[in-house]
Structures are given as structure tokens and as C-alpha cells.
């Protein structure tokens, strides 16, 4: 049997990227993550080496070389919601820290993921620096913003930028074969992801609860996801789930809301994981819901990763990827 290409995963979170690569036929060899609770979830679901410590303190020499280095590096310094500090912010240095791994291991392929705003950050300068650093190392540079609802057949509005690089020394021709996956028609409806039975009582808004009257007035349909925005409720007109965020479980109001025959309630953590495309059988440990919401919001949409990884594998093997027909 042909051996699988190996992956090392930085900022692994709960392993959304790892899951996508494994499903595409790669083998994740090791991962790094420093959040204690994310590591608990990760270990429930993966057996390979997980280095639980700050990436700045990881001894790169102690890790095995891998074919692919993947990193969904922290997005705060790049997001509009953050402070727009980019590389000046300490957290911005994470990009350069990933390059330390690249320089030490010289992987065949790079896979980076971030928020869409990375492209426009600091009038495009941040992105220019990223591109230059990658190209200066003789990697090809492919970048595209993909929305989960268009590329993962999950009704979730989630735009993320994906950056891929192939080592041109290893793949002087094959890197040209890489294409991002094609857009797909969204066939899945939000309601298909709602748990139809009664869930734990604490997820419901009942008559005696603050906000109930307002929610009852606005939340009327059973096939829609709603979002509470400071003083009002917003219906998602395109009938997809709004972007799940890392802070949605803290403060309570930003967890998307739905109506089922048992009442108006928040999405459960399990439903949030489903909106990220985690497969049946992915285990959620007994952590506080606030942690689970954060983990789902911080993660990636597994089917989108899988589709990109399938195309990476094709290019590595010299197989053409499908291209858009006009
Ligand atoms: C946006 S999430 C990435 C999610 C992940 N790519 C996935 O597939 O689910 C960023 C992750 O980086 C982790 N992180 C942030 N700073 C870190 C550091 N200094 N060392 C290690 N991990 C860090 C966070 O705890 C968080 O889980």
C-alpha cells in the first residue's frame, strides 16, 4: 500500500483541519495547541502526538518532519473585530513562527487558514508580506476566500481565506495543477441540522425569561436561524446560519437562535459542530458549554478543508484538478 503523506498541524484547536486532511487521505502525525480545553476535545478524537504548549516554546527539533505543515493561525490581529494591528501585535508574529517550522522542516506543501479580512488588512500590506515570505522560500502561492455555504454544502455563512504553497523544488510542474475546489450548489437546509427532539431545558427561552417577549414576537419560523443583535433579532434572509464565532457562548446573546415545536432556543454545541461539518461520531467531552461553543466558533468547516486537501493530493500526485467551465 502506498504510504500516506504526513501532516503537522499548528494551532490545531479541536482538529477541524486535521479531520479534513485525514478524510482526504493524509495522515496527521502531530499537532500543537495550548488551550487546555481544546486539547481535551482533541484527545477525545485523535490518537497521534499532541504537543500541549505555547507554540513559541515548542522545540521544533523534537518533532518529526512532515510533508504538509498546516496552520489556522490566530486571527484576532487580522480581524476587523480585533485591533487591526497586524504584525505589530504580538499575536501577529504567529505567521513568522509558522515559518520557523517551515524553514526547519521544508515541507512539500503549506496550508494556512485565516479570516477573510487578512487580505485587506493594513491596505493589503500584511497580505503582501505573507505572499513575499512564502514566494521567497520558493513555494508557489495560491490564495482564495471560500464560503462554507458555497464550498461545503452546509448552510453556514463562513468566509475564510486559504493559502496554499507547493515547494517548487519538489513540484516544479505539479504545483500548476492545483486548483481550489469548484463551487457547489447548496442543497442542505438549516432545518436538517436542528435537533428535532427536545433538548436540555437550559437551552430554551421560557415565559419567565428576560427577552422572551421580544424573541417570541420576532422568531416565528421553524426553518430559519436567528441572531440576537444588541437590541433586536435578525433573521438570516439567505436562510443559512450566521458565522459561528469564538465568543458566541460568553454573554449568551450571540449563539444563534431557532424555533422548534418545543419552543425558542439557542443552538446546542452539538448543532454548532454540525454546522461546521464535524462528522457523526466526533466526540464532545463533558466540558462547560461556553468552552464547546468557543471551540466550534474557532474551528473550520471540515468538508471545505477536505475538498481543498483532496485537490492538494491530486496536484502532489500530478493529477489535474477540475477547473471552472465558462
Ligand atoms: C482559529 S483557532 C484554529 C482552529 C483549528 N485550525 C481547527 O482546525 O479547528 C486558533 C487556535 O490557536 C490556538 N493558539 C493561539 N495561540 C497559541 C499559541 N501561542 N500556542 C499554541 N496555540 C495557540 C488557540 O488556542 C486556538 O485553538
Image: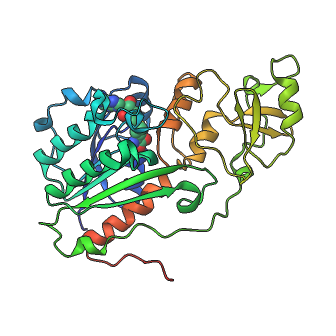
Picture mark count: 0
Residue at point 27%, 61% (across, down): 141
Answer with the quarter of the image where residue 68 lies. Answer: bottom left
- Is residue 127 shown to the viewer in this render? yes
- Colour mapping: rainbow
Work out which residue is located at the far bottom of the displayed protein and give it.
326
Image x and y of residue 107, in percent: 18, 54
Ligand 1 rendered quadrant: top left
Image position of 97 (left or right of 319): left
Quarter occupied by residue 115: top left
- Residue 51 visible in the displayed image: no
Q: Position of residue 92 (x, y in %)?
A: 30, 34
Q: Is residue 324 left or right of residue 143?
A: right
Q: Quadrant of residue 196?
A: top right
Is residue 272 depicted above or below 67 in this figure?
Answer: above
Q: Residue at x 77, y 31 (%)?
A: 232
User: Residue at 81% across / 17% down in the picture?
Assistant: 210
- Front residue of 37 and 106: 106
Left of 10 or right of it: where is 144? right
Name the residue rendered at 51%, 83% in the picture. 326
Residue 55 is situated, as x and y percent measured from the top left of the image, at 25, 31
Residue 227 position (above or below residue 214): below
166 relative position to 326: left or right: left
Point out residue 151 in the picture as x, y percentages from the top left corner.
53, 61
Position of the N terminus by quadrant? bottom left
Amino acid at each position: 500500500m502506498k504510504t500516506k503523506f504526513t501532516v503537522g498541524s499548528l494551532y490545531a484547536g479541536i482538529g477541524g483541519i486535521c479531520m479534513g486532511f485525514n478524510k482526504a487521505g493524509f495522515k496527521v502525525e502531530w499537532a500543537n495547541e495550548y488551550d487546555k480545553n481544546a486539547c481535551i476535545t482533541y484527545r477525545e478524537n485523535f490518537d497521534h502526538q499532541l504537543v500541549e504548549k505555547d507554540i513559541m516554546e515548542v522545540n521544533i527539533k523534537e518533532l518529526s518532519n512532515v510533508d504538509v505543515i498546516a496552520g489556522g493561525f490566530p486571527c484576532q490581529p487580522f480581524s476587523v473585530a480585533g485591533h487591526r494591528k497586524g504584525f505589530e501585535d504580538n499575536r501577529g508574529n504567529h505567521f513568522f513562527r509558522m515559518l520557523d517550522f517551515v524553514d526547519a522542516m521544508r515541507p512539500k506543501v503549506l496550508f494556512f487558514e485565516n479570516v477573510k479580512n487578512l487580505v485587506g488588512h493594513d491596505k493589503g500590506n500584511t497580505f503582501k508580506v505573507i505572499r513575499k515570505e512564502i514566494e521567497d522560500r520558493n513555494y508557489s502561492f495560491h490564495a482564495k476566500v471560500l464560503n462554507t455555504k458555497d464550498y461545503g454544502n452546509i448552510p453556514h455563512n463562513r468566509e475564510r481565506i486559504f493559502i496554499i504553497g507547493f515547494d517548487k523544488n519538489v513540484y516544479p510542474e505539479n504545483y500548476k495543477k492545483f486548483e481550489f475546489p469548484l463551487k457547489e450548489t447548496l442543497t442542505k437546509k438549516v432545518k436538517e441540522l436542528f435537533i428535532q427532539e427536545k433538548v436540555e431545558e437550559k437551552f430554551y427561552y421560557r415565559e419567565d425569561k428576560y427577552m422572551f417577549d421580544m424573541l417570541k414576537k420576532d422568531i416565528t419560523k421553524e426553518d430559519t436561524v436567528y441572531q440576537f443583535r444588541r437590541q433586536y433579532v435578525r433573521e438570516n434572509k439567505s436562510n443559512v446560519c450566521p458565522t459561528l464565532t469564538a465568543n458566541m457562548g460568553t454573554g449568551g446573546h450571540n449563539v444563534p437562535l431557532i424555533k422548534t415545536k418545543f419552543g425558542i432556543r439557542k443552538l446546542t454545541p452539538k448543532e454548532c459542530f454540525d454546522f461546521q461539518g464535524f462528522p457523526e461520531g466526533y466526540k464532545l467531552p463533558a466540558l462547560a458549554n461556553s468552552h464547546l461553543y468557543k471551540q466550534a466558533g474557532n474551528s473550520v468547516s471540515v468538508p471545505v478543508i477536505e475538498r481543498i486537501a483532496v485537490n492538494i493530493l491530486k496536484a502532489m500526485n500530478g493529477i489535474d484538478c477540475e477547473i471552472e467551465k465558462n
